[in-house]
Structures are given as structure tokens and as C-alpha cells.
Amino acid sequence: MNQLFMQETCESTYFRERRKMDRYREVHLLVITNRGTGKILDISRGGLSFGCLYHHDFPSVWSLDVIDARGFHLKHLGVRKIWEEQNGHADLSGSFELEIGVEFINLSPRQENELELLLNTMNCVEIQHPCFL
């Protein structure tokens, strides 16, 4: 079977200047907050960014869940808002009303292990080439 394995890191100047850890863009991760669900744009060991279809007011500190289509569910991850961009950030998606970047705070050892496991399974993202579908 012909398949392409690839790892995509976020390479925009905006993120190179602001990030100390590799971030991976993923299409199958969602964030669940008490204000609704958003699509995760990128994620690292230190935090993540996500997009919302509608504007919401998020506090500076709260907790969220991360789920993915493969069955991972990381619950009650503490986060602190680092940046917020209304009407989306052109380098990331351009299709969200609101995008937010957060850092993880006060994770338990179990949450850190679960996050590490999730990120390790993302190192080789399997993408089928359109010619072979």
C-alpha cells in the first residue's frame, strides 16, 4: 500500500519567535470547554492553540478537555490564556471567528503522561496521498 508519512511543524515567523517547543498541526484534535467545542490548530508539551467558529469570552485561567478521533481524551487540563486573535490569524486558518493560544498549567503527573502519549503518537501522522484513494 502506498502511503505518505509526514510530520508537520508550524513554521510561521509568528510561532518561531514565540514558541520554545515544537508544535504539531493536527486535523483530528478538538478542545472542549464550558463555552463549547473548538478545533485544535497546533499543540505541544507546553500548550496549544484552538479556533472557535463564534466569539466567546474566555477567562485568563480555566480548564479544558482534549479529545481526538483515535480515542484519546485528556480531561480537566489547566490552561492560561497567552494570546487571543479575533477574526482568526491568517497564518493559521483564516476560518475562525476567534483563535486562542494557551499554556498548560498545574498538570498532574498523570495528565503529563497522557499528554506525552498523545504527542508521541502524533510524530508519524499517516496521510494517504489523494492519488491512491
Image (cartoon, grey):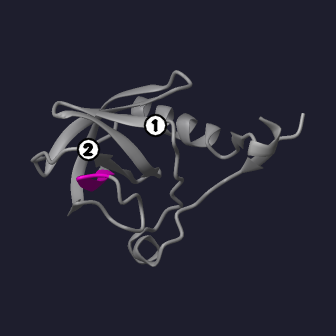
Q: Tag 1: residue type?
A: Leu
* Residue 91 picture location, percent across and down: 42, 68
Give the SS element for disc 2: loop
Which image quarter: residue 62?
Answer: top left
* Residue 29 picture location, percent across and down: 46, 37
Q: Quadrant of the N terminus?
A: top right
Q: Name the disc covering residue 53, or none.
A: 2
Q: Residue at x 19, y 44 (%)?
A: 54
3D distance between C-alphas at marks 1 and 2: 15 Å
- Asked if residue 5 lies in the magenta stretch, the reply is no
Q: Which residues are magenta?
A: 96-103
Residue 129 can be seen in this image: no
Asked if the residues shown at circle 1 and circle 2 are in contact, with their CB atoms under 8 angstroms apart, the answer is no
- Decide if residue 85 is on the left or right side of residue 120: left
Give the SS element for disc 1: strand
Q: Tag 2: residue type?
A: Leu
Q: Quadrant of the C terminus?
A: top right
Q: Is residue 131 above or below residue 94?
A: above
Q: For mark 1, does the 10 Å Cα neighbourhood hold few (<14), some (14 to 19), or many (20 or more) residues? A: many
Q: Earlier in the sequence, mark 1 or mark 2?
A: 1
Q: Is residue 123 above or below residue 14?
A: above
Q: What residue did someone put label 1 on?
A: 29
* Residue 15 picture location, percent across and down: 43, 70
- Decide if residue 20 is on the left or right side of residue 87: right
Residue 114 can be seen in this image: yes
Q: Residue at x 46, y 78 (%)?
A: 13
In the picture as drawn, the residue positioned furthest to the top comes out as 71
